[in-house]
């Protein structure tokens, strides 16, 4: 149900608000899960005062082409576990 994507390291986040930059830098470092239901590249947050419509509207301005798919198969500890570990086939984000 979905895939892991990472915002390209070279994507310029300087034109976004400080709050949006925090999210975008996290997306560059840790990536995000993209679900395969709903609208194309639709971005949403949880119901929380910190996720304002203005913040979400900024994040929606990031084009799909600014992200790359991440093959996380090499990070699995085992096929029947959600655990992962960095290693030769799963480099830590830079």
Image (cartoon, helix red, strand yellow):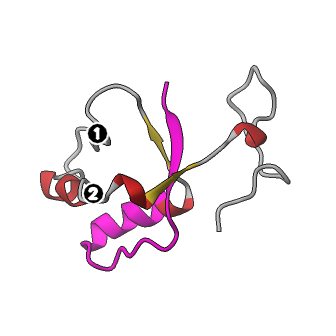
Q: Residue at x 23, y 50 (%)?
A: 51
Q: Is residue 71 above or below residue 68?
A: above
Report which residue position mark 1 lands on.
46
Instruction: State how far apart marks 2 and 1 are (Cα).
Output: 14 Å
Q: Is residue 70 above or below residue 77?
A: below
- Quadrant of the drawing holding the C terminus: bottom right
Q: Is residue 63 above or below residue 32?
A: below
Query: Closer to the observer: label 2 or label 1?
Result: 2
Identity of the residue furthest to the left in this view: 53
* Secondary element at tag 2: helix
Identity of the residue furthest to the bottom in this view: 14
Report which residue position mark 2 lands on.
59
Q: Position of residue 25 (x, y in %)?
A: 45, 66
How many numbered badges does the structure rendering display?
A: 2
Q: Residue at x 80, y 34 (%)?
A: 77
Q: Position of residue 82 (x, y in %)?
A: 68, 29
10 left or right of 52 in image: right
Q: Is residue 93 above or below residue 87?
A: below
Q: Which of the marked residues, 2 or 1, is nearer the chain's N terminus?
A: 1
Q: Residue at x 21, y 61 (%)?
A: 58
* Secondary element at tag 1: loop
Instruction: In this rendered view, identify the residue nearer to me: 68 or 29.
Output: 68
Residue range highlighted in magenta: 1-27
Q: Residues within 10 Å of mark 1 (few under 14, many from 20)?
A: few
Q: Is residue 59 magenta?
A: no
Q: Position of residue 68 (x, y in %)?
A: 52, 53
């Amino acid at each position: 149900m979905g895939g892991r994507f990472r915002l390209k390291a070279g994507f310029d986040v300087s034109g976004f608000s400080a709050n949006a930059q925090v999210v975008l830098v996290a997306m560059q470092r840790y990536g995000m899960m993209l679900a395969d239901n709903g609208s194309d590249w639709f971005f949403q947050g949880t119901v929380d005062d910190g996720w304002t419509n203005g913040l979400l509207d900024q994040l929606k301005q990031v084009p799909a082409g600014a992200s790359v798919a991440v093959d996380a198969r090499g990070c699995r500890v085992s096929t029947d576990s959600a655990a992962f570990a960095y290693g030769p086939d799963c480099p830590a984000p830079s």
